[in-house]
Image (cartoon, rainbow, N blue to C red):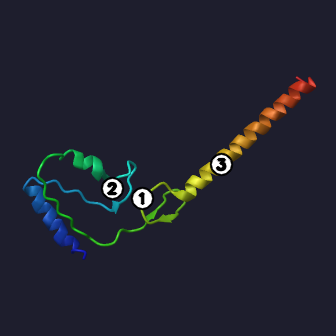
């Protein structure tokens, strides 16, 4: 059950005052490394800093994760990830560039074979 954001902020402030680290953000899986991602923090990598130490972790749910909108094409996604629409557009553009390159080289080869150069 989500906790009121003001109460969560007060809890985070108290935790920081006593020297605790507070990490806040939307929780996603998988991250670039295949681990859990909390905001900008890859939790797998982050928890390596605390290996072999005794920890207390406080999770404070603040509500549902807001959808993420691609800043390039506006595609709405449920998690932070490479935009599938932009990825398809880039792949198609790369195929078209390759086709145009092949046609250009074919045209140059034909031109040189005809001896018009």
Residue shown at 49% from the left, 66% from the top: 76
Q: Quick check: marks 1 and 2 in contact, CB under 8 Å?
A: yes
For numbered disc 2, what is the local secondary structure?
strand
Considering only order in the chain, which callout, 2 or 1, is on the residue closer to the N terminus?
A: 2
Q: Position of residue 112 (x, y in %)?
A: 87, 25
Residue shown at 18% from the left, 46% from the top: 51
In this rendering, position of residue 28 left or right of residue 49? right
Which residue is under mark 2?
37
Q: How many angstroms separate mark 2 from mark 3 (CA)?
A: 31 Å
Q: How many residues crowd around disc 3 within 10 Å: few (fewer than 14), some, or many (20 or more)?
A: few
Q: Is residue 65 above or below residue 1?
A: above
Q: How many angstroms separate mark 1 from mark 3 (CA)?
A: 23 Å
For numbered disc 3, what is the local secondary structure?
helix
In this rendering, position of residue 55 left or right of residue 84? left
Residue shown at 23% from the left, 56% from the top: 23
Q: How many angstroms separate mark 1 from mark 2 (CA)?
A: 9 Å
Q: Which label lies toward us, 2 or 3?
A: 2
Considering only order in the chain, which callout, 3 or 1, is on the residue closer to the N terminus?
A: 1
Q: Quick check: marks 1 and 3 in contact, CB under 8 Å?
A: no
Q: Position of residue 117 (x, y in %)?
A: 88, 22
Considering only order in the chain, which callout, 3 or 2, is on the residue closer to the N terminus?
A: 2
Which residue is under mark 1?
80
The outermost residue toward the bottom is: 1
Between residues 105 and 46, which one lies in front from this camera angle? 46
> Residue 11 sits in which quadrant?
bottom left
Q: Quadrant of the N terminus?
A: bottom left
> Which circle marks residue 15 in the picture?
none
The outermost residue toward the left is: 18
> Which circle marks residue 93 in the picture?
3
């Amino acid at each position: 059950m989500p906790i009121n954001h003001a109460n969560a902020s007060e809890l985070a402030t108290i935790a920081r005052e006593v020297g605790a680290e507070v990490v806040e953000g939307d929780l996603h899986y998988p991250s670039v490394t295949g681990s859990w991602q909390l905001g900008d923090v890859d939790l797998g990598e982050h928890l390596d800093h605390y290996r072999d130490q005794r920890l207390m972790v406080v999770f404070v749910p603040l509500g549902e994760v807001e959808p993420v909108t691609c800043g390039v094409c506006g595609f709405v996604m449920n998690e932070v990830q490479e935009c599938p629409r932009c990825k398809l557009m880039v792949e198609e553009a790369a195929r078209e560039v390759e086709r145009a390159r092949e046609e250009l080289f074919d045209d140059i080869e034909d031109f040189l074979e005809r001896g018009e150069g």
